[in-house]
Amino acid sequence: MTDPPPDSYGGTRDGTGVGPDRRSTTGPPRWVKVFGIIGLVLVLLVVVLLLAGGGGHGPSRHTSSGDVGDQTPPSVVKASGGLGGHKPPAGGHTP
Amino acid sequence: MTTRPRLRKFVLTAHVVSSVGWIGAVAVFLALGVAGLTSQDAQVVRAVYLAMEPAGWSVLVPLSLASLLTGLVQSLGTKWGLFRHYWILIKLLINVFATIILLLYMQTLGYLAGVAAQTTLSSGDLSGLRSPSPVIHAGLGLLLLLVAATLSVYKPRGMTRYGQRKQREQRSASAVVV
């Protein structure tokens, strides 16, 4: 959010620039509908990917795990008593 | 609830700095991701994934949270409000969405850093490290943040039903006073 433009919202003199929206209607403008559709698709995509990945947004889906093997990385071991955010996914790091 | 002009300027500055800084940091992550994906030098690949995790926790996460927090204060502390204008509402959704994905994705960066930290990396491990996911996440994140920045500058018209109702209430209140 940046400083409001002086005139684009009616040019009020209260220092905020927020004034009457002359073109306001009861329904949302077209650009909002377009954004809404794109946002909905994006959220659905994330939900589907989360469900497909066993409910986690972990590394199992992000790495070409077939090459990594079954090894547990050092950071996972360290994080078990630390941040707690580096837990491996439910299925481990196996393919 | 409105804040004093001096405080408003301070919060606005903090919001712009943190938001633009977040964009810059994500752009750097995109560059690192591309380097990790394409470099033929094993040391470069390892360095990239080792650097991403601490940089994520110390730069990306604080900037994203600062951007969200200052944005909330800035909107709620001025007459813009948080739910009155569609562009502000969409910016809020973008910010919350990007922050949640970032926090979740830190698991992956931690895992990649862990694999890269191992001293006995074989060529197979390196190819496993060469993940396109940092590039994808940073690229999409950058796109989202640029959309949010564009909304901030253009401030497209359109008030929510709540905003329209509030506006009518303010008009009638000011008419009573006059």
Image: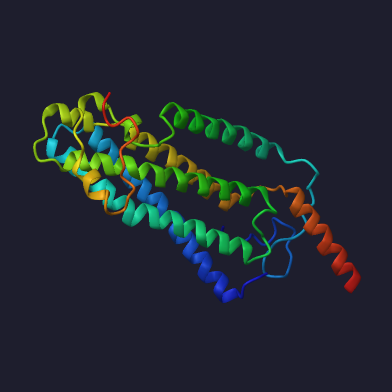
Residue at 62% from the left image edge and 52% from the top image edge:
B88
Residue A30 x, y percent position in the rendering: 70, 36
Q: Quadrant of residue B168?
A: bottom right
B124 on left or right of B140: left
B41 on left or right of A46: left
Residue B11 x, y percent position in the rendering: 52, 67
Residue at 56% from the left image edge and 30% from the top image edge:
A41
User: In the rendered image, which quarter contains the N terminus of chain B?
Assistant: bottom right
User: In the rendered image, which quarter contains the C terminus of chain B?
Assistant: bottom right
On screen, B32 above or below B173? above
From the viewer's side, name the closer residue of B73 and B120.
B120
From the viewer's side, name the closer residue of B162 and B26.
B162
Residue A5 x, y percent position in the rendering: 64, 59
Q: How many labels does the image show?
A: 0
Residue B36 x, y percent position in the rendering: 23, 36
Residue at 71% from the left image edge and 47% from the top image edge:
B158
Q: Is residue B30 visible?
A: no
Q: Can residue B4 be seen in this view?
A: yes
